[in-house]
Image (tube, rainbow, N blue to C red):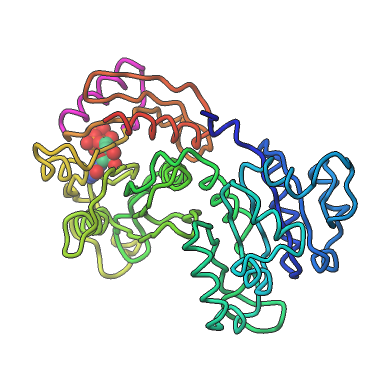
Amino acid sequence: MVSQSERNRVVLGITGSIAAYKSAEYARLLVSRGFEVRVVMTESAQEFISPTTFQAITGKPVVTTFWEEANPAVIGHIEIADWADVVVVAPATADFLAKVRMGAAETPLLALILATKAPIVIAPAMNTNMLEHARTQENLKVIAESGVTIVEPEEGALACGWKGSGRMASPWEIFHHTVRAIGDGDYVNKRVLVVTGPTREPIDPVRFLSNRSSGKMGMAMATEAFRRGAEVAVIHGPIRALLPAKISRQEVFTAQQMYDAVVEKVFGEGSEAFDYIVMAAAVADFRPKQPSELKIKRSEQPKSLALVENPDILAELGKRRGEETRPVLVGFAVETGEIEALLEAAGDKLRRKKADIIVGNFAEDAFDLDTNRVWIIDRHGKREEVATTFKTRVANKILDAMKKQ
Ligand code: CTP
């Protein structure tokens, strides 16, 4: 079987829309991540951006017609259709969608869409009214039902002067879907809940107790689970949640709100059955007992701050799960000091909170950084060290371990 890392050939189709300028950025993103990219452009696409741009970015000739084969021994659009590990059309116009639905083959891009066995990802871009038109919606529905991934357009100001839906998704958004389409899909049909970020415990209306958590580890877990095919929901503290648009998200501030949101999502009415729950949040253990309704003045200098304990979300999940094996529960232990103490604390939290996995890490390796160094400990006594690497890689190691539970 060809592994995901060996599937790195992207055919990028570009049709005639002003959004084509964003395709250059997307192509660059792919190349910078080690993907091989071959570009196929329609005639009208070339009115918006030159093939030379893509040739320079990808280092490969751009296909623009049926009739100028660099190598007469091959039929270009068939060769490229077979070469592709994934075909991405971004931007895709309303006209292009209609023709894909029909099965037309009048341009090299349409022909290769028919000829390829690779997964197809389409990112539409058009005027709001054209997008909302019943015919376009029907075309999108039929195309999606045939197994093609549609990267939904975003809301915003459009080149035509209208405001609304129709703007092509961002290069990052299309990238997430590309990786998901090309990937092993080992989390397909799995539901994952990730809880991440710090909490804020109010002292008065302008002050709070919090911590240095950036939420990056949790966001990496959510994004990588999405890329591996999962349906993902995120509950997060006050952070900027940079996540694929298809991931549902809910923002909370205090530990109590986080607890309520998790309990509601997992056990509440109409709750969703999660296969995995990842508690990556840095939940404040204590909160001020009596937050002041008014700002505390310097002249009122409080002598001390009375605190009360917050509920333990992970322990509650462990308790309520009882003897069941699902959902798999994953927690983190951020510690300071020596490795032995870290491992002991992680093992202790695993047992105390009845989790399946605890990921131990040091505060100085983790906080606010894009990298991390972790020890993954599971309830069967297995322990794996992941040396310092990007949080996306760490997330994938944790996802590998989660699957074994
Ligand atoms: N956690 C939680 N609810 C809390 C506190 C922690 O769900 N109120 C979760 C965290 O998200 C993490 C794990 O429990 O996954 C361990 O968090 P940590 O703060 O290290 O655990 P504590 O039990 O608070 O231990 P410590 O004494 O080290 O603070």
Q: Is residue 338 left or right of residue 244?
A: left
Q: Position of residue 321 (x, y in %)?
A: 13, 43
At 75% across and 46% down in the image, what residue appears?
38
158 vs 309: above or below = below
> Magenta residues: mostly which secondary structure?
helix
Q: Position of residue 40 (x, y in %)?
A: 77, 54
Q: Nearer the viewer, residue 318 or 35?
A: 35
Q: Is residue 264 left or right of residue 212?
A: left
The spot of residue 153 in percent (x, y) is 57, 68
Inspect this view and state whether residue 288 appears: no
Residue 73: give x, y in percent of width and height. Answer: 85, 39
Between residue 284 and residue 225, name the one nearer to us.
Answer: 225
In the rendered picture of this protein, how many numbered marks are placed on residues? 0
* Residue positioned 88% across, 55% down in the render: 67
Q: Is residue 124 visible?
A: yes
The magenta span reads: 333-352
Figure quadrant, ligand 1: top left
Tell me the quarter of the picture where residue 90 sits.
bottom right
Does residue 311 appear left or right of residue 133 in this picture? left
> Is the residue 102 above or below the residue 312 in the image?
below
Residue nearer the viewer, 67 or 51: 67
In the foreground, 81 or 400: 81
Q: Is residue 217 magenta?
A: no
Outermost residue on the left side: it is: 323
Whether the magenta-drawn stretch holds residue 345 is answered as: yes
- The residue under the point 88% across, 40% down is 71
In which quarter of the view is residue 108 placed?
A: bottom right
